[in-house]
Amino acid sequence: MKAAVLREFGSSLSVEEVADPVPGTGEVVVGVVAAPVLHYTAEVVSGARRYLLDLPAILGTGAVGRVRSVGPDATKLRPGDWVRCDPTVRSRDDAVTPDVVLQGLTARGDGGLALQRHFRHGGFAEQIMVPTENAAPLGSLDEADAGQWAALGICLVPYGGLLDGGLQPGETVLISGATGTYGGAAVAVAIAMGAGRVIAPGRNRAALADLERRFGHRVRTVVLSGNEDEDRAAMQSAAAGPVDLVLDLLPPSASVAAARAAAMTVREFGRVVLMGGIGDDVALPYPWLMLNSVTVRGRWMYPRDAVPKLIALARCGLLDLTQFEVDEFALSAVGEAVEHAAETGGRFRLTVLRP
């Protein structure tokens, strides 16, 4: 098969002929129809992200495609079935704290690197091999829509945080970092889950206006000033009532003060979920946490059962994947696709490869 291979960081992706994957027990081979290109793929290729990825490797986090072949223990998947290949691969020999690798991207720690030796290669190829449990059935779909379904990968990250935060229909959720790629998706997912009100703070007025246009009166935006106390008051005022849940998706470039201002809008007995990239301590006040019985938790990626749940939300129309504008490239143009993703990536934009 043909695949886009990274042989060393700092070099270009090379489209090469490589051996077809052969599934063993607990594995499925999928013919790739659409593979998402993350907006920061160029930083992975250059080595700037310093991701744990043994080379050479086929890049690409996940894919949408059709089953080619299955291992002997598969009982429901059949060749021809449409599936989403989930890149979050977990080790099977520790159910409590499994090692994790993001197939085609990075590993988490030494255990993840050990797992990566087998599940290393991603979706920038004509075929991909994944654990059987990572091939999530999509049901019937038109091949022309495969790129749209690849947007599930963007939505799954904030969905994991909203699930962990226990978002209930009718509740008010504040999305800290709402104008970013994952923040915008979080607004869409929260609406799909039945949030009564979504508070969307940010500094980009055009991006905030776009969120209001897309989702209507259930979204209330707040233009941030950079003053922590003023911003907290503005967000609470926009909520016009208790904030039940705060989901933080701020990028590494954001300030600790911005994250703290958002987190401290939450009500007594409220929940805060941290999923962003801020590297410094947020330093939430001990007395405020204790006296208000606030729950704070971190979440990296999403639980395994989030995948079929989100697919169900999309299948029934509650999550509208047509919100995403998709730009498609052939595998032979992978270099152009990576550049395009870097230049145009953002809220509701997605670049995909069509091998």
Image (spheres, rainbow, N blue to C red):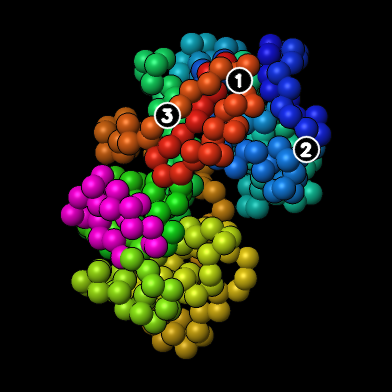
Tell me the element at label 2: loop
Between label 3 and label 1, give the one nearer the viewer. 1
The reply to whether the magenta stretch includes residue 118 is: no
Asked if residue 301 is positioned above or below residue 41 in the image, the reply reads below
Along the polypeptide, which appears first: circle 2 or circle 1? Answer: 2
- Gap in angstroms between the C-alphas marked 3 and 1: 16 Å
Residue placed at 25% from the left, 74% from the top? 237
Q: Is residue 249 left or right of residue 120?
A: left
Asked if residue 23 is positioned above or below residue 51 in the image, the reply reads above
Circle 2 is placed at which residue position?
A: 10
The reply to whether the magenta stretch includes residue 208 is: yes
Local packing at callout 2 (Cα closer than 10 Å; few below 14, some 14-19, many 20+) is: some
- Gap in angstroms between the C-alphas marked 2 and 1: 18 Å
The spot of residue 137 in percent (x, y) is 45, 25
Q: Amino acid at mark 3?
A: Val
Q: Is residue 115 left or right of residue 68?
A: right
Circle 1 is placed at which residue position?
A: 333
User: Which quadrant of the figure contains the N terminus?
Assistant: top right
The spot of residue 149 in percent (x, y) is 42, 28
Task: Give the mark count.
Answer: 3
Circle 3 is placed at which residue position?
A: 326
Residue placed at 31% from the left, 65% from the top? 222
Q: Is residue 150 left or right of residue 268?
A: right
- Gap in angstroms between the C-alphas marked 3 and 2: 27 Å
Q: Amino acid at mark 1?
A: Ala
Please give the range of residues in magenta: 202-222
